[in-house]
């Protein structure tokens, strides 16, 4: 069974631009979560989606948004990019929110210049 | 709010030896899960082992085992017969039973010396 896939793997943007990252969960998995990893702040939870609904959200500004489609694929969008948004963005999936283990994708490395 | 603390930023172990990585957490909840994830240079986060808080028995996965002390809120990872491929950043993580949100520690960078 294929793992979690994320596209693109690498991205370079400039300040003020917006970016959309995509995540396809493991087949059959319906819960998708997003995390941001930076050297300064470590790993931080962004949000979680299940059945096309955002169920939980971390402490990030409104520039960070996401959505989930009916096939469970998820996208996250960051508008008006700032230098501090440079990070590795990780997506994780689980069968349902009740299943305790999340499986991670390889991440998208975003560099904001 | 829940917190996870890893007090060892770096550790080193000789190949074939045993090493223990420390993790403590703080929570007022009684129902939760604890995890150890491994992140090699590829940055892919790989699940190493998980522990349900309601289980008293310590989890074991091949060469990896945990020492879960619920009262002390301690969750250490023991790696036996260390291999070169074990070299990675190891993260301890906490998850409430009711919320799909992992809270991570700051990580321990493990080096394995040949």
Image: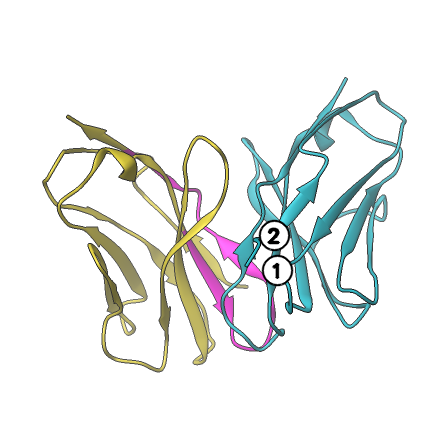
Chain drawn cyan in the picture? A
Q: Residue furthest left?
A: B17
User: Depth check: B102 or A91 in front?
Assistant: A91
Which residue is labeled 2 in the image? A4
Determine the image quadrant of residue B100: bottom right
Q: Which mark is residue A26?
A: 1
- Residue B31 x, y percent position in the rendering: 45, 80
- Residue A54 x, y percent position in the rendering: 78, 66
Q: Is residue A52 magenta?
A: no
Question: Label 1's element?
Answer: loop
Determine the image quadrant of residue B55: bottom left
Q: How is the image coloured?
A: by chain
Question: Label 2's element?
Answer: loop
Q: Name the residue: 83% across, 20% down.
A: A14
Give the chain letter at badge 2. A
User: Depth check: A40 or A105 in front?
Assistant: A105
Q: Name the residue: 58% across, 78% down.
A: A98
As drawn, B72 above or below B102: below
Mark closest to the chain's N terminus, 1 or 2:
2
Chain drawn yellow in the picture? B
**Marks 1 and 2 close (CB-CB < 8 Å):** yes
- Work out how far the residue at label 1 is from the one at label 2, CA to CA, in angstroms: 5 Å
Q: Name the residue: 23% across, 77% down.
A: B57
Q: Is residue B97 magenta?
A: yes
- Residue B74 x, y percent position in the rendering: 29, 62
Q: In the rendered view, does A91 fall on the left or right side of B82?
A: right
- Region in magenta: B92-110
User: Depth check: B11 or B63 in front?
Assistant: B63
């Amino acid at each position: 069974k294929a793992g979690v896939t994320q596209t693109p793997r690498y991205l370079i943007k400039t300040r003020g631009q917006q970016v959309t990252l995509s995540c396809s969960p493991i087949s059959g998995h319906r819960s998708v979560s997003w995390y941001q990893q930076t050297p300064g702040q470590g790993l931080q939870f962004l949000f979680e989606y299940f059945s096309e609904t955002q169920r939980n959200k971390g402490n990030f500004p409104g520039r960070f948004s996401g959505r989930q489609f009916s096939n469970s694929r998820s996208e996250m969008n960051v508008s008006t990019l700032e230098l501090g948004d440079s990070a590795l963005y990780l997506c994780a999936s689980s069968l349902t929110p009740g299943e305790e283990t999340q499986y991670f994708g390889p991440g998208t490395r975003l560099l904001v210049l | 709010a829940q917190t996870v603390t890893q007090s060892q930023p770096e550790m080193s172990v000789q190949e074939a030896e045993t090493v223990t990585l420390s993790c403590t957490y703080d929570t007022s909840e009684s129902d939760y899960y604890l995890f150890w994830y491994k992140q090699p240079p590829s940055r892919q986060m790989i699940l190493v082992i998980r522990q349900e808080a309601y289980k008293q028995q310590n989890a074991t996965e091949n060469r990896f085992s945990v020492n879960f002390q619920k009262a002390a809120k301690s969750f250490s990872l023991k790696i036996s017969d260390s291999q070169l491929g074990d070299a990675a950043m190891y993260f301890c993580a906490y998850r409430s039973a009711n919320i799909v949100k992992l809270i991570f520690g700051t990580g321990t960078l493990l080096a394995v010396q040949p």
